[in-house]
Amino acid sequence: MKSIPTINKKFSYRSYWNLGIVFFFIVIYFADGITRYKHILTGLIYFTAIISLIMEKRTVFNMFKNNLFLSLIFFVVAILYSLIISRDINISIKAFNKEILEKLFINTIAIAIVLYREKKENITNLLIFSLVFSILPLTIKEIRQYINEYHQGILPLSTFEHRYISDWLIFIMPSLLSFWLYKNTKSIILFLLLSLIFVLITIGTLQRGTWLSITIVFIIWCLIKKEIQLPNIAIILLSILLIQLAIINQGQYDKLFYKLKQMDSSHRYCNGTQDSALDLIKDNPIIGYGYGEQLFYKIYNERVIDYPEWIFKQSIGPHNTILSIWFAAGILGLVAILYFFISTFIYLLKKYRNNKIKDGFLILMLIFIGDIIIRGLFETVHISNMSVIIGIALALNGNK
């Protein structure tokens, strides 16, 4: 029977260090209010990557000789172009330095270099355990927020203030499912306990895009792993939970059941977020306006007077990742983001098929599909989230 893997006692101190700093980096990656600790961990990763690069630069660079990394460079170049044509260069440079240069490009390279000498099994275990362990800070954060809201008279499942943990939840989902495969009593109990916490937190987001992403990831995983028992258990338990909430509902769960039944997406397509973004893009589809979320808000708010049919008189964003890049860098940005996404999917799929250690690539592929592709259709996902996916993917393929 498969059990939860243990750490190899023959680890070198260097492996403990490399895996450890990336482990804690992933654990707190989505956490808010701990910027100081994030900077410390990021600095340690950069320092370690520089030392590794100096010591073994001849072999390190081989890891980046592939179409995936080329697509990343092309995307960064497209965003650099958007700085040249930007309607507000200060906003664009600030956004580029933070989101693209540091969080996407440099972090991707640093993570890959730090991990490239580690065994694939150890990198896969790092990915699984770091994401599952991150349920702990996520749960603490959510409990504190629910308690603060309760003191203000706000009941659970009645506010949309928890939607901003959606990326975090989608990243956790594929790794959490891996625990189901460890067929022993302790592992199953741990899986069920963590799954209950995960489901309750996920429902609390009241965001259908998140629910859809997690559901599709769950279905794909079950199909690949040929799991029949787990979907049946999930459907039964989730149905019981929703029925009980419906029975005791006295108004406090109205938003939940409204989101479950809502079919109208007019606020997204019919002169809503994505339609208004398309209107702006159609006015300047080739050149673009410049990179940055705040720049989109600025231009939208300036142009809203020209479009009285728009539903939102103040911008809340394009709510679509591809549209946001097309808006920023015109047709070059559109080509770059599509090339980037297609290259990532093909790379992960090929490596999954051609490697004996498949779980790591499967988890990364499911995270990419769930967060970047599916959720990206309904929200403007931070493209910097790709740094974890690509950095670990390159490292998994780096150790031959």
Image (tube, rainbow, N blue to C red):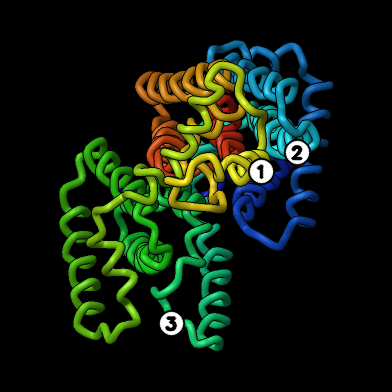
Residue 11 higher or lower than 267, as above or below: above
Which is closer to the viewer, label 1 or label 3?
Answer: 1
Q: Earlier in the sequence, mark 1 or mark 3?
A: 3
Crowd tier of the residue under label 3, counting other residues whose Cα lies within 10 Å: few below 14, some 14–19, many 20 or above: some
Crowd tier of the residue under label 2, counting other residues whose Cα lies within 10 Å: few below 14, some 14–19, many 20 or above: some
- Report the disc number at residue 91: 2
Q: What residue type is labelled 3?
A: Leu
- Report the disc number at residue 155: 3
- Report the disc number at residue 174: none
Q: Distance between the residues labelled 1 and 2?
A: 10 Å
Q: Nearer the viewer, residue 307 or 187?
A: 307
Mark 3 in CB contact with mark 2 (< 8 angstroms):
no
Which residue is at 44% across, 51% downward?
311
- Report the disc number at residue 298: 1
Q: Which of marks 3 and 2 is nearer the N terminus?
A: 2
Q: Can residue 354 be seen from the camera position used here?
A: yes
Q: Nearer the viewer, residue 262 or 354?
A: 262
Q: Is mark 3 on a helix, strand or loop?
A: loop
